[in-house]
Amino acid sequence: MMSPAVRILGSATGVAEAAADRIVEAAIAAVAARGVFHLCSTGGSTPAALYRALREPSRAARMPWGATQIWFGDDRVVPRVNPLSNVYPLDTELLNTDAAGADSPLSPSAVHPWPTAAADAPSAVRAYLAELQAVGVAHTTDGFPIFDLVLIGIGGDGHCLSVFPGSPLAVGGAPVAAGVSAPTHIEPQLPRLSFSLGLLTSAREVLALAPGAAKAEALARIFSDATVVGDLPAKAALIPTATWLLDTASAAHLPA
Ligand code: 6PG
């Protein structure tokens, strides 16, 4: 469970731009190979800059928007219009009309949020997994969607997705996805819907985005051989199909 690629950029903006560049290349390759690009996005504070970078003309012109479908690895159980929703940054940075008045390059129907208004978490999970099947996303034999690219952010406690330290979703044999109780140790303290860690090993490619000094201590623990996935779920992305995009501040405590 080792040997991801690690790139250390100069700043958080550099991380967003490197991620956007990689998304464009992965999308072009996926569409050439299979006619469609399934991107599984993430929440938190990192994606907004990434969506803005994707919309810059040099990238937007190359991106196969019409063949792109966007999903989410997890979400908070709030309406999409709530700024705490993981879909909100996409709505406000990618699906909106931009400052110059240009329409979004992406069709709203290509965005697939978790059904956070479902009656309960099991119904939401069933509906989301059914939507993946209906749209034709390939699956592993154990039921995980095979996304072309999965983006993850890293929490200061070492979580990714909404798989927190000690979570039943961090162990082998966990369900593909489940409802997660509101965490009490980290904001926002809201119930979540989340894939389990098998999402990462099932993906064709993973990009872990972790810029900023606030991530430095967690990254040092994640990259240490002395720690385990159960305590630091983001260790599950230390795989050869993953690239970790860090900046000089977040990489400060990593060995050279
Ligand atoms: C969520 C996320 C979560 C996030 C990390 C990093 O819903 O909270 O999907 O896994 O990506 O907490 O968040 P930041 O980018 O805000 O540091």
Image (cartoon, rainbow, N blue to C red):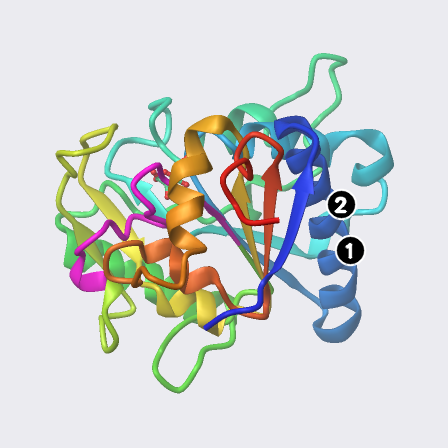
Which residue is located at x 46 percent, y 61 percent? 237
Question: As drawn, is 175 to the left or to the right of 102?
Answer: left
Compared to residue 80, the image places residue 236 above or below, namely below
- Amino acid type of the residue tagged 2 in the rendering: Asp
Label number found at residue 176: none
Say if residue 192 shows up in the picture: yes
The quadrant where residue 106 appears:
top right
Q: Residue furthest bottom?
A: 141
Which residue is located at x 81 percent, y 39 percent? 59
- Marks 2 and 1 sit apart, C-alpha to C-alpha, by 6 Å
In this picture, which residue range is highlighted in magenta? 151-169
- Disc 2 vs disc 1: Cβ atoms closer than 8 Å? yes
Question: As drawn, is 12 to the left or to the right of 159?
Answer: right
Q: Residue furthest front?
A: 256
Which residue is located at x 23 percent, y 44 percent? 192
Q: Which residue is mark 2?
A: 21
Residue 153 on image: x %, y %: 45, 43
Residue 36 is inside the magenta segment: no
Q: 27 or 223, which lies in front?
A: 223
Q: Main secondary structure of the magenta part?
A: loop
Residue 94 on image: x %, y %: 61, 31
Q: Residues within 10 Å of mark 1 (few under 14, many from 20)?
A: some
Dot 2 falls on a residue whose secondary structure is helix
Q: 142 or 64, which lies in front?
A: 142
Q: Quadrant of ligand 1?
A: top left
Dot 1 falls on a residue whose secondary structure is helix
- Amino acid type of the residue tagged 1 in the rendering: Glu
Residue 197 on image: x %, y %: 35, 64
Label number found at residue 25: 1
